[in-house]
Image (cartoon, rainbow, N blue to C red):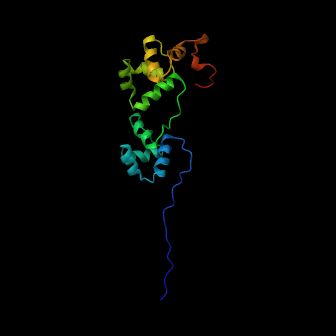
Amino acid sequence: MQFAPITLKALKPKETDFEPQTLGEHVKKRRLELRLTQKQAAERLGVNPWTVLNWEKDHTEPPINSMPAIIRFLGYNPVPAPVSVSEKLKAARQHLGWSRKRYARELGIDSGTLRNWEEGAGVISRKHQRIVAKIIGSSDEEVIADAVPLRGGLRRQDRGSDHQ
């Protein structure tokens, strides 16, 4: 009796040695490291498996309210460390997973003002400067300096910057 040769096949292991560039790639890399399916990752993240697929393929960006779950899933915050007052203010909001509208309401300002602050317009009012300093863990002086217009109408953060 002669036996036919047996060929075994298996799925090729997914590569996890890439350097993630996008939020979706961070999620994908972590999911692969944990050997989770997209469905299992979605359960941990509290979203639909299609949502994880779209994030991983960079078809969509995770909404801000998903950021706390993503940070827990990854074990770190993939967003670069904020440097300017506006970046620190936005990062504080993202860490909470709050919309701009909710964050503005909590600060006692309108969402347009918050948008301006997050986009780099200095915080003008002393009262608001103190509030922002407390939120971002900076000194009042840093927030005040950020709001002081310089010669030619440039704010401190715009000095020496070649990009918009």
Of the pair 37 and 35, the residue shown nearer to us: 35
Quarter of the image containing the C terminus? top right
Q: Is residue 21 above or below residue 35?
A: above
Residue 158 placement (x, y as % from top left):
59, 20
**Residue under the image location 47 percent in, 29 percent down:** 91
**Quadrant hosting residue 130:** top left
Taking the image as drawn, is residue 113 in sight?
yes
Residue farthest along the bottom direction in this orientation = 1
Of the pair 125 and 113, the residue shown nearer to us: 125
Taking the image as drawn, is residue 125 in sight?
no
Residue 38 placement (x, y as % from top left):
41, 51
**Residue under the image location 52 percent in, 28 percent down:** 82
Residue 82 falls left or right of residue 109: right
Residue 90 placement (x, y as % from top left):
46, 27
Of the pair 137 and 91, the residue shown nearer to us: 137
Residue 71 placement (x, y as % from top left):
44, 39
**Quadrant hosting residue 54:** top left
**Residue under the image location 49 percent in, 71 percent down:** 8
Q: Is residue 125 above or below residue 78?
A: above
Q: Is residue 92 above or below residue 31?
A: above
**What is the count of numbered marks?**
0
Of the pair 124 and 44, the residue shown nearer to us: 44
